[in-house]
Amino acid sequence: MTDYPMTWALGDHIVNRVGYGAMQLAGPGVFGPPKDRDAAVAVLRAAIVAGVDHIDTSDFYGPHVTNQIIREALHPYSDDLVIVTKVGARRGADASWLPAFSPDEIEAALHDNLRNLGLETIDTVNLRIMGAIHGPGEGPIAPQFERLARLREQGLVRHLGVSNATAAQIAEARSIAPVVCVQNHYNLAHRDDEALIDMLAEAGIAYVPFFPLGGFSPLQSGALDRVAADLAATPMQVALAWLLQRAPNILLIPGTSSLTHLRENLAVRDLKLPAEAVAALDAIAG
């Protein structure tokens, strides 16, 4: 068993640090319906049975498809399930990822999420800042975050976060309303947010790495493969376990449409990396 904390605060909930990311429930390229909708429903239900209490989604996955599958699988939702969504983008007819970042578009996207999830209030909404897919864009976010703060005051949202954000944008958001989570690109090979993670931990703010397994180009490393072989684990399990041990405020949202991969992802809760393995993995980004 692990000896580091396996729960963290997400807003007013204490959640298990290994959650579930719903992106892969949509079709190829996160666009259109899945090949097997029944299998997608089964994966969601199995995740809940296995102790997942934190699901990350967005209405621009599909679009709309993922949230509709979540509703089919899990509605009415249990009181201890935290659903986190994000707004700030839309999908083009050609499956492109496009900004939808005006305050009015932000508000419309929130209502889309409410409708497709079958909710009157969403627990947490992240403002997704559309820079590069893998990295943030600079610039102020006050008009957009102020609109979300107003929607929070109206009771449509309980908590707010930011995604794909710089440290300056996070500070700007926190000056407007409380921020309970930050969702940025971070993994074994991409560590631009090292100092930010520690600062957020001190503030009690969750850090949720997207692309924890490398994203569209899966992590490839001889050191990772060797550590995995020594521990009789998969490289992806080791990469997730490294994140869990990196900082107590890191929440994982690995996604899959496979029951087998779901079980593999959740097994990292019991995988402890010895010091020499951590040292070898820490050297990957060097």
Image: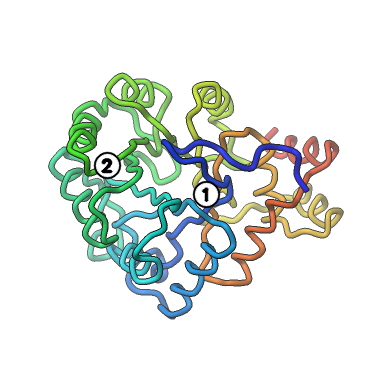
Q: Of the residues under marks 1 and 2, which one precedes in the sequence?
A: 2
Between 197 and 251, the one lying in front of the other is 251
Residue tagged 2: 157
| Disc 1: which residue | 211
Q: Quadrant of the C terminus?
A: top right
Q: Amino acid at mark 2?
A: Val
Residue 231 against residue 4 in the figure, above or below: below
- Secondary structure under badge 2? strand
Report the number of discs.
2
Image spot of residue 147 (x, y percent): 18, 34
The secondary element bearing badge 1 is classed as loop
The amino acid on which the numbered mark 1 sits, given as a three-letter code, is Phe
For the residues bearing labels 1 and 2, Cβ distance under 8 angstroms: no
Judged from this view, the residue extending furthest toward the left is: 104
Residue 275 position within the rendered picture, expressed as x and y whole percent measured from the top left: 83, 36
The single residue placed furthest to the front in the displayed view is: 79
Viewed as shown, does residue 221 lie left or right of 77? right
The residue carrying pointer 2 sits among few (fewer than 14), some (14 to 19) or many (20 or more) residues within 10 Å by Cα, namely many
Name the residue: 34% across, 54% down: 58
Q: Position of residue 124 (x, y in %)?
A: 35, 43
Instruction: Kindly identify the residue that appears in the image at 43 percent across and 35 percent down.
Output: 181
Residue 133 in the image: above or below residue 118: above
Q: Residues within 10 Å of mark 1 (few under 14, many from 20)?
A: many
Determine the residue positioned at 55% across, 26% down: 201
Quadrant for residue 178, please give it: top left
Front residue of 41/136: it is: 41
Q: Nearer the viewer, mark 1 or mark 2?
A: 2
Q: Position of residue 121 (x, y in %)?
A: 26, 48
Q: Nearer the viewer, residue 220 or 1?
A: 1
Mark 1–mark 2 distance (CA, rounded to whole Å): 25 Å
Left or right position of 181 against 147: right
